[in-house]
Every structure is written in C-alpha cells, then in structure tokens.
Image (spheres, grey):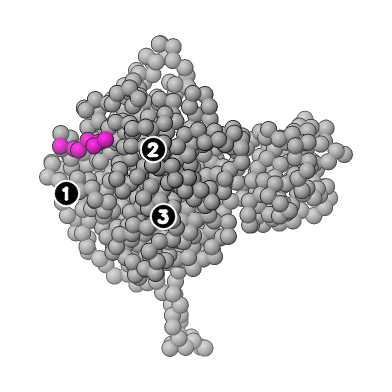
Amino acid sequence: MTIFAPAHRGRQGPFLVTTVLFAVSFMPELVTCSAGEGARNDQPIPQRRPNVLFIAVDDMRCELGCYGASHVKSPNIDRLAASGVCFQRAYCQQAVCNPSRVSLLTGLRPDSTRVWDLVTEMRTVMPDVVTLPQHFRQNGYRSVAYGKIFHNPFPDAASWDEPTHNAEGVVAYSEENRERLAAHRRQMRASGKSQDAIDRMRGPATEIQEQPDEMNFDGRQTSDALTKMRELASGESPFFLAVGYIRPHLPFITPKPYWDLYDRASIPLAANPQMPKGMPAVAFGDRSFGGFYELRGYMDYADAPSPFDKPLTEQQQRELRHGYYASVSFVDAQVGRLLAGLDELGLTDNTIVVLWSDHGWKLGEHGGWCKQTLFELDTRAPLMMRVPGAKANESSCSALVEFVDVYPTLCELADLPVPSTLQGSSLKPLLDGTASKVKDAAFSQFPRKQNGKDYMGYAMRTERYRYVEWLDAVTGEVRARELYDHDNDSQEDVNIADAADQKDVVAQLSQQMWTTLPRPSFPHPQLRTASSSTATPSAVASRPSLTWNAAGKPIPESKPAGEYLNVTFVNHRPETAELIWLGPDGARRSYATLRENETFSIRTRPGAVWLLEMVGENNDRQLLGHFLVEAKGKALQAVIPAP
C-alpha cells in the first residue's frame, strides 16, 4: 500500500511512503464465540456492525483530482473516491459553517433547525434534538470526535462519549506575524476603529510555515485520532470516529512542503471573474457580503475592494489560490494517514468511510471569494462514501444528493433505526446500484440583508437548472429571481430569469420548489430570536394547551421523540419563573426567565419535560411545576397559571 505525501526536504514534489501491513489477532468484523458447553461450531458467526470513519473538511470545494481538477494534488482523497462512490453533485443546505453542519448532523433543513447563522447554538433552539453521532451512540457505538465537527465554539457534549478532542501544543501564526497583527490592531485603535472591529481583525491571510506537520493543528490531531483509532479497534463496541479538519479555511497556514507542490505563476485563475449578467444585487448582499467580508477580516486584505467595484490584483489572486491549494494538499496528506491507519489495523473491510466538506468556496469566480451565496460554487461540495462490499464502489455518481441525506444513509448502512423526523433520503439505493437517483432536486437557502431589508433566498438545483427566489423576509413576496441553465451556462454567468422565453420554465420551477419544500411562515422565523418571542399571551391563547402539573405531582422521565412542535410558554404568575429543560439523562438546562405575562417560544418534541422554578433573593429555588409536551398540534401554549 502506498500513500502520497509531499517531500519534506527540498522541492522534489511527492514521494512514496511504503507502509507494510501487519497482521492483527483482533478481527473487528467478527464477534467470536467460544466453543464451551452448548456452543455449536457449525453456526454462522454473527457480523459486527460496521465502524464509521467520519471525515469533515472545512471550506473545501469540488476542485480535486476526483472532480476533474488535474492541477490540484489530492492523491489520497482521490484514492478514497476511486475505491468508493464519489458524488459529483452533492449540495449543502446553507453555504456557511454552522447552519450547514447542524443541518447535516441533524438531518434537518435550516428552516427546521432554526440555525441560520454562525452564532446560534443548536441546543438553544432544539434542546432535545438527536444528532447523527448521538444516534449511533444510543445504539451501541462509541462516538468520539477530533477537531471541528460541529461549528466551533459549539462542540456538542450530548453527541460524544468523550469531550471533543482538540490538538494541543501546536503553532498557528509565527511570532513575526503575531507581532504584525498586534501592531496593526494598535494602528486601528489609534485611527478610531471600534473595539469589535479590532477584536475581529486577524493576521495575514496566508503563511508558509517552517515547521513539521505535527506542529500544525490538523497534523497533530491526525496523530491523536490515529492513537484513538488503535484504542477503539480493540474495544468491544463498533466506533463512530469523527475527524474534522480546519483547512482549507482561511487563514491558509500550511507547512512549506505543501506550498512547494505548486508553481504560483502557473496556477490557473478564475475563468469568469465578472459578476453574472443580470444578477440581482441581493445575490451578493450589501457589497461586502457574498462571503467577501470574511476575507476582509485578515489584515492584509482589510481594504480589499468590493466585487461590485473591481477584482483583486492578479498577485493577490495568485497568493490566495496558492494558499488554498497548498491547504487542500495538506489535508489530503492527513486523510491519507487516516486511511493507512484503517489498513494497518485491519479495519478497512468493516469500516464505512465518509468524507464531506460543509460547503463550497469561491476563488475569484464572479469576483467573489469565500462562501455565503446560493451559487453552484458555494452550495456544491465534496461528498464520498466507501462502504465495504457496496456494489457501486469504484464509481462516480451524478445523481442529485443533499447533505440531509447523510444521516438516514448511515443509519441504513449500519442497520440502525432511521428516525422518522429526518428530512433527507437514504442514498443506500445509489450505493447498492439499485437506483440511478433518489430525488429530482436539491435545495439550499441563505438569509441576506440588502439596503436595510431582510430576505431569505431559496435555491433549487435540478438536472438542468439552478433556480433561486429571494423572498421578502417580512411579507414573503418574491423580490428577485435567478435562473441559470447549466446545459448552456455551467459557470452561471447569465441570469435568464427575466427572459421572456423562460416565463413558463420559471413558473414550473417555482411550483416544483414549493411543492417539494414546506413554504415558511412570514414574517420569516429567522427574524425572531429564540430567547425573545414577539408573541403576546393573547396571540397564542387560541392554541391547544399543555397540561400544567403543579409542584407535588410526580415528574416523569423526559423522553423526547417524534415531530418537532412550537411551544410558547406564558407566565401568568406575578413572580419570575425560570424555564428549565430536563434531558433524557436527567441533565437540566436553563433556557429563559419569564416575568409576569412574558412569553418564550421554542421548538421541542413530544415527551420532553420542562420544569418551572421560582428563584428567590438568595438564589433559593422552589419548584413551581412542570409541563410534559404532548402532540396536540403543531403550535401549542404552555400557561403557567396565576396562584
């Protein structure tokens, strides 16, 4: 077996590292049976459930060898794709880290998770959601995470058997660049910049590290994950091992050998650096959006021009592309180490390997950089699965698939129950070779503020078209449309939504979108925060009521399950009441304090228990009572009655 990795001396490019496979006495694919009294040696040995190696990569677009990009050096990911199924048209549900990851890991779309931004913590809006690794954990797997799986800083404790592991003792920016950043921030302060802007500013967007892989976060955590893999291999339970890489996310801080793989002068630049003809401005937002504001958060690109004005200089474009490709190759080498670890431990034949990136990325196309649009480049991302024995292995799949499909797929592959709440479709028929498609369209969305107004954009990707509607977030009216014909315009350079000869196509696609997706209510829930509801007690009075159980009644075990419901808690007591969610494991978590006649709305599931406590001046607590959520309707009220 060979692994491709860059040479760490000189500029000779890739070299081959030969790894000798060794025999292991533990065979993870079999559960052995001793031949004691009553044992029958002729009985079939039961099959152990497959392990899962779950590899998440941040900001990696479909520019790899396995996606036809011969100029990018990604031999290990290409090897994984060649041995499994490489999905050529996989789409995230929102092209930014937190919403995309929450969507994939819950199997729910952003309008269902109510996570549309980088700051909302999943458990604040869905306290009892069961995530993908949590579901595996509940069904006998040992679930362990290294690095970025959920969006930092929100590692989800309920999902894992151990706290999320993060590499220690590593070096990011060099001392020189840390000093440059400190000086830049002092200059910002002297010029009157706000403290928020100063705190947000980062060092340079690129750095060529003069240090070994092990001193980089992704390199160190790969070593740590391999150590854990050896431990898990000898355990009695199958494992769900998640490894999340932070590159090629900005800043592009990568060891020098990976930069040496590329000649900056010969790196191809974007073939379409211009804005799409006829593109509505809301598609990018208020001049600094479309992901561009992210690039401006780095000190050497703080004054980068808006793509509405002019492109970056050629030197800047080449520097960023060089750093991005070097970061991709660095992560590729780490993926190679993980795959080699499976081989060496004899785990390959009983381990499902999934590799995905949370969304795509722009590298100068349409004048843009980063993500956060509804273009194909942002919403399409790598997804590949290698399932031992799958008939479709060693093939490329062109079917339309979505990230919400990953959860039900892995459940079926591991023979676990598939939760009825999931909104994706299992890809098992594609992996089995028994179907050529599982759906007719893939959907993404993105919130946008433009000229002081709020919008929610919805995109639908069909076999031929990308169709986008930008809805007024208050009224729900369609304010702008985009239509790109991929048969004639694969780069999405011309928006033809307003063309007279496309009127029927637009009408058909709009009908298909809202027949397939549940149309949101308006004002869009994204405009309302989970911690403060605009609902008044009178506005929710007509909803079905949950039963109030005053203190003294037995508190049942919390067993949330089934479809999510919207519950609005209303406090009619003169005292302030604290609202506490009771977890299935007995854990307690405070969500709100409600003064008299205040309300709080949240999504929760039938079987969940919510406690109400009164907190005295000395922090003395008195239980007032509890609610057990019942499936009485989609929207419910939970009234804390006056004494």
Residue type at tag 3: Val
Residue type at tag 1: Pro
> Which residue matches tag 2?
499
Earlier in the chain: of badge 2 and badge 1, it is: 1
How far separated are the C-alphas under marks 2 and 1?
A: 50 Å
Residue 519 visible (yes or no): yes
Q: Secondary structure at mark 1?
A: strand
Earlier in the chain: of badge 1 and badge 3, it is: 1
**10 Å neighbourhood of mark 3: few (<14), some, or many (≥20)?**
many
In the picture, the disc for residue 401 is 3
Q: Front-most of 174 and 563?
A: 563
Determine the residue positioned at 61% across, 35% down: 523
Q: Secondary structure at mark 2?
A: loop
Tell whether 459 sits left or right of 472: left
Q: Which residues are magenta?
A: 266-272
> Which residue matches tag 1?
14
Determine the residue positioned at 42% across, 29% down: 281
Q: Residue 211 appears in which quarter of the rendering?
A: top left
Residue 116 location (% of width, % of height): 52, 39
How far separated are the C-alphas under marks 2 and 3?
A: 29 Å
Q: Is residue 236 above or below residue 524?
A: below
Tell whether 166 sits left or right of 567: left
How far separated are the C-alphas under marks 1 and 3?
A: 34 Å
